[in-house]
Amino acid sequence: MEFSLTTLGSASAKPMVDRCSSVHVLNARGRLFLIDCCEGAQFQLVRHGFSLMKIDNILISHMHGDHVFGIFGLLSTLGLLGRTADLHIYAPRDFSSMLNFFHGHFGEGMKYNVVHHPLTSHTKELICDTKTVDVYAFPLNHGIETYGFLFKEKWPEHPLAPTDRYERSIAYCCDTAPFPELEEQVRGVDILLHEATYLDDLREVANERYHSTAAQAADLARRAGVGKLIAAHFSSRYKDPDVILQEARSVFPESYLAKEGEKFNVPYRRLNEESN
């Protein structure tokens, strides 16, 4: 019944001794989705107890290195492990040239197919339909083609199944500057992971670089009525990210920090039950 998001990397572009760049794992009742794949992603997966072979779907938000540099190593290791099942990667169109380079130089002997599903929509679009979850992509505001992801739990239809099961939801928005349409895309989700690269005294810098401050992320969470905000993607200038948390909680009390290895679970419940 698990529906959770585990952070394996909370830093922005520059990795730190105790913080890796962007990589997260969503567990939808046993089905694992890797969200972004920074340099060192496979080490973080192994370090925190995830089986590489159980990942069938990878989502890449955009083609900046701190979100995609780890993909070559992961694909190579899956080949060494003898993978035969297809691996599905949902990524911007430009990912195809990167994938072709990998196959041309390092793909010899691989026994599995990598299926690239190009992300192209200018509105929210269903990109992955499984038995346990629907995955939607929607455009973000980051200066290059960038997507956020929405995971909405679903249950199989069965005449004996309860009809009052609550369908849980998690949204991922990293990287992006604020823009008006985002509020509706994430409205009412149980967990919103949103970048909080800077504190609000650097709002102008954040805007210039198409990023968000902690206060801006928290304000979005408040207006959209989400359950919890997970602030992530911290600039390396903040040695102690608690300052990010303090700023976010001053706007939206149900704010938390993404930390390497920390899991946020949305408990199973019925529609008439209070959430935790």
Image (cartoon, helix red, strand yellow):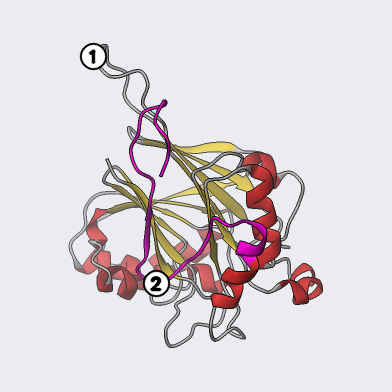
C-alpha gap between disc 2 and disc 1: 40 Å
Residue type, numbered disc 2: Glu
Mark 2 = which residue? 260
Picture residue at 68% right of the left edge, 52% below the top: 220
Number of other residues with Cα within 10 Å of mark 1, as a class: few under 14, some 14 to 19, many 20 or more? few
| Mark 2 or mark 1: whose residue is earlier in sequence | 1
Picture residue at 21% right of the left edge, 53% below the top: 84
Image coordinates for residue 213, horizontal then vertical, percent: 69, 67
Res. 41 image quadrant: bottom left
Quadrant holding the N terminus: top left
Q: Is residue 209 magenta?
A: no
Q: Nearer the viewer, residue 228 or 158?
A: 228
Residue 109 seen in the current view: no
Number of other residues with Cα within 10 Å of mark 2, as a class: few under 14, some 14 to 19, many 20 or more? many
Res. 2 image quadrant: top left
Q: Is disc 1 placed on a helix, strand or loop? A: loop
| Side (left or right) of 10 relative to 243 | left
Picture residue at 22% right of the left edge, 61% below the top: 51
What predominant SS class does the magenta segment belong to?
Answer: loop
Mark 1 = which residue? 160
What is the span of residues highlighted in magenta in the rendered image?
Answer: 248-276
Picture residue at 67% right of the left edge, 74% below the top: 198
Q: Is residue 268 magenta?
A: yes
Q: Is disc 2 placed on a helix, strand or loop? A: loop
Image coordinates for residue 106, horizontal then vertical, percent: 35, 72
Residue type, numbered disc 1: Leu
Q: Nearer the viewer, residue 27 or 127?
A: 27
| Side (left or right) of 15 relative to 216 | left
